[in-house]
Amino acid sequence: MIVDNPFFVLGIAPDASRIEIEREAQKLLGMLELDFPDARTYVTPRGPQPRTAEAVRAAVAALRDPFRRLVAELWARHAPPTRTAAPPPAEAPAGIPGFRRRLGWRP
Amino acid sequence: MAEAPLYVGIDLGTTNSAAAVFDGERVNVVRNAQGATVTPSVVRLDKQARVTVGTRARRFVEQDAANTAAEFKRLMGTGQEIEFPAAGVKRKPEELSAEILKALRQDITDQLGVTIERAVISVPALFELPQSAATSEAARLAGFSRVELLQEPIASALAAGWRADGDGGGTWLVFDLGGGTFDASLLETRDGLLRVVGHDGDNFLGGRDFDWVITEHLASRLSTVPQRNNPAHASALRALRLAAEDAKIELSRGERAQVTLAQPLSIDGNDVEVDLELDRATVERLCTPLIDRALDVCMRLLSQNGLGPGRLGKLVLVGGPTVMPMVRARVSARLEAPLAEGHDPMTLVAQGAALYAATASLDGRAPSTAAPTGRQVWLQYPAVSADLTPHVVGKFVGGGEDTPAKVKLVRNDGAWSSPDATVGPDGTFVTSVTLLPRRACTFTLEARTATGTVVPVTPSALTIVQGLTIGDPPLSRTLGVALASGHVQVYLDRGAPLPARRTFTHHTIETVAKGSSESVLRIPIVQGEMSQAHLCRLVGTLDIGGDVVTDTVPTGSAVEVTIELDRGGRLSARALVPSIGQVFEHVAHLLVPDAAPEALDAAIRDLRRQLMELRTDAFRHGLGQVIEKLDRIESRLSEAERDIDAAHGGDADAAQRARRALLDVDATMSEADLARKWPELDDAARHVAIAASSSVGMHGTEAERTLLQEVLAAMDKARREKDAPELERQMKLASRLSNAAFNRTPEAWELYFEDVASDMSTMRDLPRAQRLVNEGKAAIEKTDTDELRRVVKALWSLLPEDSAARKKGFDSGVR
C-alpha cells in the first residue's frame, strides 16, 4: 500500500478529483506508450519505483471504487515523507545495535 | 486532412443482430438490404451449400428447418457442429456467426461505401472464456483484422447514457431481456464517467421462454397435443412456435390475435387444423411469472448494493421482449423508477458498441498506407474524453531537415488554440486541448522550428469527442490458479481493468522427470468468486510434461506463472521454470463440454440426491434461509429436467441449456452447503475478529487500525445478513491485517517456528527439516529475526499436501 499506492503511481495528491485522476492517467499512458524517460519511474517514500502501463491502469481502477479510494487515501496521507533518492543501505542508522529491531522494525 | 474516423459496433445476438456506426457526432444504425435495422441471426445452406442469411433465411425455419440454423450463439465454444443435410456439410457455430458478421459488414459497405476491418462486438456479460474466444474467431473468419469484445450491459448503458443530456449523475439499472438471457446491471454516472456498480442475471431466461409458454398453451388447445420430448413432433412444434412468436408481437399493439396456419399440422399421422384465438390477457397471465423472475434478480441486485426500489434514477430497457407494453408497465411499477425514453431496445447494444469503439480508438477503417509527408509524429490522446481539457502527448520520430522546437494545436472552429508547447531534445512534447461539450472537435497540429519556420507534420490533425466514457472494460469474473491445497490463488479480481497481467511464483509439489510422459505438472486456471477451487469453473490448463522439459524439474522448484487477458477478455498464460530456463505457453483451452442427454440424466440424479441430503439437514437445524435457497434449486432442477426431456428429443440447444443450468445448480448447492456450515463459520469469524483487534490494536499502525474498523463493520454486516461467501472474504482481509501487524513483533516468528517444528515428523524431506529446525533454534538464541523468518518459510514449504484437497484443486501440481 506504500510502494504501489495509486496516488504515488499517478503522482497526484490524495485530494485529486475524479477528472484530474483520469486526465493524469491518460497522459501517463500516452507518455509510457511513447517511451518518455520521465514517465518510467514514480516517487514513493521508499524510493523511486518503475512505472508500467498496467500499474497505471490498475491505479485508476482502484481510485474509481469509492472504498478502495478511501483506503488508498489513508495510506497516502499517513505515509512517511517522500524520499526521492534511492533508499540508503539498511544498516545506515547509527545507535544501539538491534535497537530498532526490538522496537518491531523490519529492515 | 485525414478522413474523420468511423467507429463500428456490432450486436451479435441470439435471435437478432444489428450494426451501428458512430462518426464522432451521431450514432447511426445500419440498415440491411431489406431496409431493416435488425437482421435475424439465422443462416441457411441450400443444396449447393449457398448461404442465405437474415430475414430471407428465417422464412425457411418453418419449411426447411433441417437446413436452417437459428440460435447457434448458444452453442458458441462448444465444438458442436451443426449439420446441413441438403448440402451434406457441417458447420461450427462460429462459422455460422461469421456469416452473420459478413452480412452486416457488407451492409455497412453498401450504406457508407467504406470497407470495415475493425469493430467492437458485444457479448453477454456472463460469457465464459471459450465462448469469447469463439466470438473472436467468428470475426476473424468474417474478415475483420481486429475486434474488441464488450459486455452487452456496458454497451446499453453507454448508449443510454450518451443521450442523457446533462442530467448529471445518478444510478441506472439496465434491464436487458434478450432472446435467451437476462442481464441486470447497476451503473453509476458521475463527472461523465460511467462505472459498473454491480451485475446479476439469469442465463436461462429470455424471449424464447415467453414463446415457449405461449406455444405450450396453444399446443394444449389442439385436438392432438404435440409433446416436446417426442422427436416426431418437433416440426409441428416449430411451426406452432413461429406462429406464437408472431402472435406475441401482434399483441404488443392489439388486444387480440388470430393464430392460423395455412397448412394443417401433421401429428401422429393426423392432420390437425390450427385456428385459435389468443388475447392479450392470456399472454400476460402466461408471461407474468417469467417477468417476475427477472424482477427478483433486479431486487436482489439492488439490495446487494444497499438500494431499495424507488432509489433508481433511471431504468433502461433493452431487448425485443421489453417492447411488450405489459413488460414495460410491470417493470417500471415494481422498481418504482421512470423508464428512459427514446431508446430503441433492439439496437441500443449495437449503438453502445459503436460508441465504445470510439472510446477504445478502434477506427473501423484499416490504417492508411499512404506515404507520410513531412515530419512524422506519434500522437497519444483519448478519442473520447469526459474531461473538457485532456492532454495530448506526442513524439517526433525519424529525421528531417528542420527540427521542431514548438508545437501548437488549433481547434478547427478557430475559436481556440493552445499555447506553444516546447519540444524536448528527444522530440517529445506534452500539451492539452479544450473541447466543446458533447461535440467532436478536430485540431490541427502546427509545428515550428526555433526560428519560426513552419515544419509540415504527419498526421497533421486529430479528433477528440467529448462525452460519456467508460474506462477500461472490467473483468466479469475473478480469475486465478487452483493450488494443490484446493484453494485458489487469485490473479485478477473481478472488476480488474482489462488488459491486465499478473505474475506469481509458485512451487512444484512433485518432480517432473525428463523424458517421462507420465509425469505432468498441471497448472489449472479457474474462474469464479469462491476461494475453493472446486467451486470455480475450470477454464484452461497449462501442462508441463516430462516429455517436453529439457531437464528434470525437482520438487519445490519455482514456477513463475503469468496470466494475461487482453481488452476483449482473451486469456493467455505462461509458465517460466527458472531452474531450467524454459517457458511453457501452451494453454489447453477447454471447450464448453458436450451435453449428452445420458450424462445429463446421471448428473441430475446426483444433484437430486445431494439436494435431499441438504434439505433433511437444513430442516433438522431449522435454517430457513437455506431451505428457501434449496426450494429455488428444486424449481431450477425441474426446469432442467424438462430441457433434458427435449434433449432426448434431439434438441441440442436444450441440452446446452440443461448443462449450464446444472452447473449453476451445483454452484448454488455449494453455497447452500456453506450456509449449512454457518454456525462453524460464525464462530470462526468471532475468533478472527478478536485476534485481529488485539493484534492490530497492539502492533498496528494508525492506517491499519482504521482499515480494520472498516473490515469489522463489513464482517458484522455479513454476519447479520448470513452471507457466507462475503463473510469468508472479509475474514481473510481481517486475518491479513492481523498478520501484518503481528509479524512486526519479534515473538511472532518464534511462535510460528514452534508451531511448524511440531509438525516435523510429517514433512517431506526429513533430514532437511531436521537441519532447518536446528538452524531455527540457533537463530532464536542469536535473536536473529531475519534468519528465523527464512527458516520458518522453508519449513512451511516442506509440509505435505492433502491428496483429497488436491483433487478438489483440479489436480494442481503447484502450491
Image (cartoon, grey):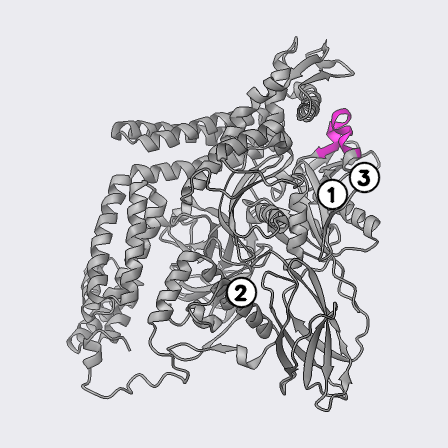
Distance between the alpha carbons at the discs numbered 3 and 1: 16 Å
Crowd class of label 2 (few under 14; some 14 to 19; many from 20; radius 10 Å): many
Q: Are marks 3 and 1 in contact (CB under 8 Å)?
A: no
What kind of residue is marked 3? Answer: Gly
Q: Nearer the viewer, mark 1 or mark 2?
A: 2
From where the camera sits, is residue B295 visible?
Answer: yes
What kind of residue is marked 2? Answer: Glu
Query: Residue at coordinates 43% horizontally, 67% vertically from top-left?
Result: A15
As helix, strand or loop, the secondary structure at mark 3 comes to loop
The magenta stretch spans which residues? B56-69
- In this rendering, the answer to whether B770 lies above or below B169 is below
Position of B59 with respect to B397 (left or right) is right
Q: Quadrant of residue B71?
A: top right
Position of B496 with respect to B399 (left or right) is left
Quadrant the N terminus of chain B occupies: bottom right
As helix, strand or loop, the secondary structure at mark 2 comes to helix
- Give the main secondary structure, helix, strand or loop, of the magenta stretch: helix
Query: Residue at coordinates 44% horizontally, 46% vertically from top-left?
Result: B536
Query: Residue A97: within the magenta?
Result: no
